[in-house]
Image (spheres, coloured by chain):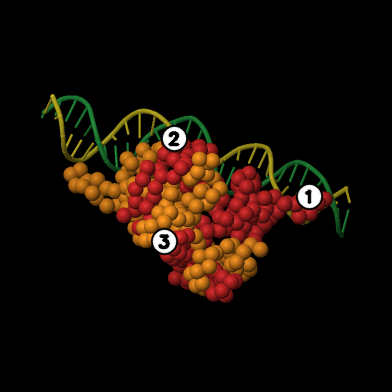
Chain colours: A red, B orange, C yellow, D green
Amino acid sequence: MRWNELADQTCSVARTVSVIGDRWTLLVLRDCFLRIRRFEQFQEKLGITRPVLADRLAKLVAAGVLEKVPYQLRPVRHEYRLTQKGLDLYPVLMAIVHWGDVYMTSEAGRPLMHRHKACGHLFDPMMVCSECRADLTARAVTVEPGPGVRAKPANPPAGKAVG
Amino acid sequence: MRWNELADQTCSVARTVSVIGDRWTLLVLRDCFLRIRRFEQFQEKLGITRPVLADRLAKLVAAGVLEKVPYQLRPVRHEYRLTQKGLDLYPVLMAIVHWGDVYMTSEAGRPLMHRHKACGHLFDPMMVCSECRADLTARAVTVEPGPGVRAKPANPPAGKAVG
DNA sequence: TTGACGAGTTCCTTTTCCAAACCCACTCTG
DNA sequence: CAGAGTGGGTTTGGAAAAGGAACTCGTCAA
């Protein structure tokens, strides 16, 4: 299966992975959330090669995750900003950061802390059920087919998730 | 930067990406959460080639995300199960699924629905602040250096996240 | 008119990935 | 007990992607 076939699958994970399922793309997005916006900044901070960076940025723009905004004319220069679609990837990035903080941190401790402006506290991200707001775990969830199940269901018709 | 250098970075995203930042790995994990456990099942459901599947499973086992458990002897056969470390990737997968449901779903609707056993409702996953339990957005969070900032800080010393 | 800057391209080498086929231990069937 | 079947992988080359360094293209400033 090639990258472009992924997007055609009847599975939200496959479709999302077709956009962000690449190591460099995820690192570029991390930097976007840390307010990096310009080609040279990305290149220096990431240590990514220029051709790969140009390719990833173009793909993210094509996917509607970033937009290219001119910040000066003569010569025209652009910066890359997260769109709302891109901002909505925040939970994905935060979930990744949190897992890394828990399982991949050196003895020195986590490299970055997060503070919630609204309540003022340092916090960890938590995933909860939208209906009852209880903490979510894999074992507490079952899956059911939705209206979009069709053709080649990469997902099974039904069943518990994990056991 | 090569894959193995990623894990050495002072950044939880980079470290996590060194484990799961690969399209096949994410799809394998998706299937793990859907209770797929055996080599042949993964291979058939994913359409992944055998060498790549063997490689990804071995890496996930090495990373402690999956464990190889014998389910029969003579001939000995193993299945791959999520460890606690692997189960804790659930928020990452759910965040990915949710974003795909919102932005990548065809007109037919989402392919899979999730039901929370505890409350009985179909739900969406939400990310909230562990301290005040309010919904989290990128704009509501600032980052600060933690104790693990050192050497080559791939993260800036401080600053708001997005604005 | 030479340099510098920002944002990319081009070109070539090295890795990594993929597809099909092959292998191996063991069991079952005739 | 020969041959086929099963589960779980390797081996082997060709295709795609990543890495590295240099080059291009407007524009301005010295």
Tell which circle, 1 or 3, labels the residue nearer the N-terminal end: 1
Q: Name the residue under label 3.
A: A136
In the picture, measured across the screen, residue A98 lies left or right of residue A68, that is left
Give the residue type that dot 3 points to: Leu
Tell which circle, 2 or 3, labels the residue nearer the N-terminal end: 3
Tell which circle, 1 or 2, labels the residue nearer the N-terminal end: 1
> What residue is shown at x 47% (from left), y 37% (from top)?
A1
In the picture, measured across the screen, residue B136 lies left or right of residue D30, that is left
User: Total of numbered circles in the picture?
Assistant: 3
Instruction: Between residue C12 and residue B88, name the one nearer to us.
Output: B88
> What residue is shown at x 65% (from left), y 59% (from top)?
A36
Q: Output the chain of dot 2.
A: A
Crowd band around label 1 with a 10 angstrom C-alpha radius: few (<14), some (14–19), many (20+): few
Mark 1 to mark 2 CA distance (whole Å) = 47 Å
Q: Position of residue A65 (x, y in %)?
A: 61, 50
Give the residue type that dot 1 points to: Val
- Residue B134 can be seen in this image: yes
Q: Where is residue D12 in the image (x, y as percent from the top left)?
A: 39, 33
Per the image, label 1 sits on a secondary structure element best described as loop
